[in-house]
Amino acid sequence: MPNIGMTELAVILGIAVLIFGAKRLPEAARGLGQSFNAFKTGLKDVAGETPAEDKKI
């Protein structure tokens, strides 16, 4: 897979702004981050770990 350069990132960002709009883009990113954190927490729960145990390391 080739490396993604600045031009490609600018095109992707431009398409995202067109799809979501400038006002909804931060909300979409926040929701994606919260979903990712919930997914990671769920994986830790399945493995028998808790988030508090992760911070002790």
Image: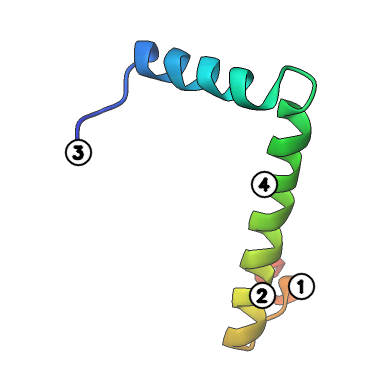
The C terminus lies in which quarter of the figure? bottom right
10 horizontally vs 20: left or right: left
The tag earlier along the polypeptide, 3 or 2, is 3
| Residue indicated by mark 3 | 1
The tag earlier along the polypeptide, 1 or 4, is 4
Q: Position of residue 35 (x, y in %)?
A: 69, 56
Q: Position of residue 36 (x, y in %)?
A: 64, 56
Viewer-side residue, 18 vs 27: 18
- Near mark 3 (Cα within 10 A), the count class, few <14, some 14-19 or many ≥20, is few
Q: Residue at x 36, y 18 (%)?
A: 8
Outermost residue toward the front in this view: 19
Q: Residue at x 46, y 22 (%)?
A: 12
| Residue indicated by mark 2 | 42
Marks 4 and 2 sit apart, C-alpha to C-alpha, by 15 Å
Q: Position of residue 25 (x, y in %)?
A: 71, 27
Marks 4 and 3 sit apart, C-alpha to C-alpha, by 24 Å
Viewer-side residue, 6 vs 11: 11
| Residue indicated by mark 4 | 32
Q: Residue at x 19, y 38 (%)?
A: 1
Q: Position of residue 2 (x, y in %)?
A: 20, 31
SS assignment at label 4: helix
